[in-house]
Image (cartoon, rainbow, N blue to C red):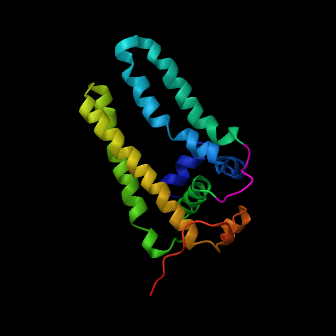
Amino acid sequence: MTIEARIARLHRMDDAAWARHANPWSVWTRVPILPLLALAIWSRVWIGWWALLPVVLLVGWTWINPRVFPPPPSLDNWGSRAVLGERLWLMRDQVPVPPRHRRLPTMLNAVAGAGGAVLVGGLAWLSPTAALTGFATAFLAKIWFLDRMNWLVADMAEDPRLLSWGYRAAQGGPPPIRQD
């Protein structure tokens, strides 16, 4: 089982939660979590222990978010395809992804993890440079990862899992890359 699959299991992501998480509202309301969480942790300087309140609320939102929104009426949008791609990616030990998609997502996750570690250090030592550098690195790597997941969906558009999740290749998305 991949590390991503273990994280999904920890978040109790079942088929219903994944279907709801494919709603673009779910995707785009998760985007500000990292900067808000960093700000909430930094705010301990100004508000002391009260900083725990927004931290707890944001962690709670992270867990509840994939369950709040209804399944989308269409999967023909960037956010929905990113979620579908993540599902394919975390199942790659069962059904391999195309060769050109094997290295970059792993590297992007490693870069995001390294950025997250720098962010944590910056927040712990109250170093604005480290915190902002770590945040920018983690955030941009994650967005790039999600974009790669869109390409993965385009290249695996006929995968039976995608079809069972309601995705139809004719819905759009980036065109597959030719392998000449």
Pick whichever, 44 or 29, lies toward us: 29
| Residue 51 in the image, given as x and y percentages of width and height | 45, 17
The answer to whether residue 107 of the structure is visible from this angle is yes
Q: Which residue is rendered at x = 45% and y = 56% of the image?
A: 145
User: Does the magenta-highlighted stretch encompass residue 1?
Assistant: no
Q: Is residue 64 left or right of residue 58?
A: right
Q: Quadrant of residue 29?
A: top right
| Residue 127 in the image, given as x and y percentages of width and height | 25, 28
The answer to whether residue 118 of the structure is visible from this angle is no
Quarter the C terminus occupies: bottom left
Pick whichever, 56 or 130, lies toward us: 130
Q: How many marks?
A: 0
Q: Which residue is rendered at x = 53% and y = 24% of the image?
A: 56
| Residue 50 in the image, given as x and y percentages of width and height | 46, 13
Q: Which residue is rendered at x = 70% and y = 41% of the image?
A: 69
In the image, is residue 111 above or below residue 10?
below
Is most of the magenta stretch helix, strand or loop?
loop
In the image, is residue 156 above or below residue 41?
below
User: Does the magenta-highlighted stretch encompass residue 73?
Assistant: yes
Magenta highlight range: 70-76
Q: Is residue 41 left or right of residue 155?
A: left
In the image, is residue 71 above or below residue 158?
above
Q: Is residue 72 left or right of residue 90?
A: right
Pick whichever, 116 or 172, lies toward us: 172
In the image, is residue 131 above or below residue 50?
below
| Residue 148 in the image, given as x and y percentages of width and height | 47, 62
